[in-house]
Image (spheres, rainbow, N blue to C red):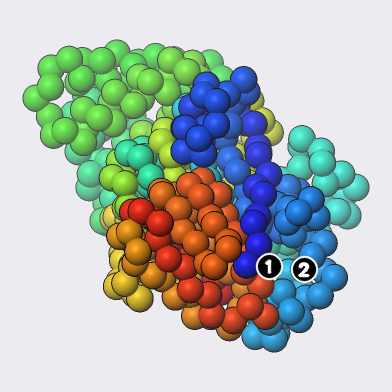
Amino acid sequence: MEHLEGALRPYAWGSHTLLADLRGEPSPSPQPQAELWFGAHPAAPATVAGTGLDEIIAADPAAELGSRVRAAYGDQLPFLVKLLAADAPLSIQAHPSREQAEEGFDRENAQGIALNSPDRNYKDPNPKPELIVALTPFRALAGFRPVADTAAYFRALACPELDRYAALLPTDSDGDLRALFTTLISLPVQSRVELIEAVEGSARALVSHGEHPDWMVEAAALYLELNEAYPGDVGVLAALLLNLVTLAPGEAAFLRAGQLHAYLSGLGVEVMASSDNVLRGGLTTKHVDVPELVRVLDFTTLENPRAEQAARGGGVEFQMPVDNFVVSMHELASGEALTIDKDGPAIVLCTAGQVVDGGFTLTQGNAAWVPASDGAVRLSASGNAQVFVATV
């Protein structure tokens, strides 16, 4: 087990306080601290004693990854752990499946688009299913809202300009939202701005009257918030169709390939397949590629994006239909021990208190790399502690 120094990503939407406060660093930070990457992705590998984790794995993949992981994923770590701290909305986005990622990566390579080009969609040939676990109250737009709820929301807004598009909602509750979404996101600029302004007036009325279900009031308030931050942006219209969820600390949301989402605010632990592929549809100054986003989207609705939890080894394991990673969360009382029994690599992240293993101490906001060759690891809490374990 070795200390893993994360790679900081200072994206503009990041918080100046959340990560700094968690890690006991000066707060506010001089630059936004959006994400801290603990992994081996070549775009921003974490380091062990100054050496990139990707280099460490490449030097001895048998010891670092183990035979089972190498047989399934080659000589690459198949998951990436992050601390994510949002102080402003991230872009409306989705991620590709493995087949879509491989095709898109090869296509952009053939087109001669540099890997570091701001116009590049596919940075690697990997899919990006992802789990976000809240450390603070965490708001997110996650997946298309069920059709019946969106129809009720549109009726509550009572906006004639929007009603014309409501006719594109499927009549079958199991129908998808392709027709409505692609129409809204493809509107000419002038038509889009006029529609956004019309819905803004209806959203203000809905919020001020307060006679509708809380979730509708919250959705309308978010619409106003997004339009103030990104006036006239197509992502504001996309948000009309998405679930708005607030995760309490310890709750999680899982998003598979093709599910549209945008994180809005809060601090969380994010674990995903090791990929940096993002197809954006708005709420950003970065590259937006609407046709490519539409091509990878899953237009079916999502009843509840929250990930289920099952008891495991004194903690909880988040239930996800993926084989790239397994994530568990452990709350430890002072002196309580956690045994990590595995046959592959693991990343251990401490998010409260500290844990020790002999002379090794892992403190709050920091992570450790556990190569496959280490076998089982036993950690003891020094005071109350919270630990996340990601493995394969």
The percent coordinates of residue 249 (x first, y second) are: 31, 46
Report which residue position mark 1 lands on. 77
Residue at (31% x, 64% y) in the render: 308
- Residue at point 28%, 26% (across, down): 220
Q: Residue 286, how many percent across, how many down?
A: 66, 30
* Residue at left offset 54%, top offset 67%: 358
Q: Amino acid at mark 2?
A: Ile
Mark 1 or mark 2, whichever is nearer to me: 2
Label 1 sits on a secondary structure element that is loop
Q: How many neighbours does mark 2 have within 10 angstroms: few (below 14), some (14-19), or many (20 or more)?
A: some
Neighbourhood count class around disc 1 (C-alpha, 10 Å): few under 14, some 14–19, many 20 upward: many
Judge from the rendering whether residue 350 lies leftward or rightward of residue 53; answer left or right. Answer: left
Q: Nearer the viewer, residue 248 or 52?
A: 52
The extreme left residue here reads: 211
Residue type indicated by callout 1: Leu
Residue 11 in sight in this render: yes
Residue 142 visible in the displayed image: no
144, 136: nearer the viewer: 136
Is 145 left or right of 196, judged from the image as shown? left
First in sequence: mark 1 vs mark 2 = 2
Is residue 9 found left or right of 248 in the rendered image? right
Residue 150, label in figure? none
The relative height of residue 113 versus residue 257 in the rendered view (above or below) is above
Q: According to the image, label 2 marks what residue?
A: 57
Give me the residue at 59% from left, 81% from top.
375
Along the line of sight, the residue nearer the viewer: 114 or 75: 75
Residue 301: x %, y % from top left: 35, 54
Residue 208 coordinates in the image, percent (x, y): 17, 15
Location of the C terminus (image quadrant): bottom right
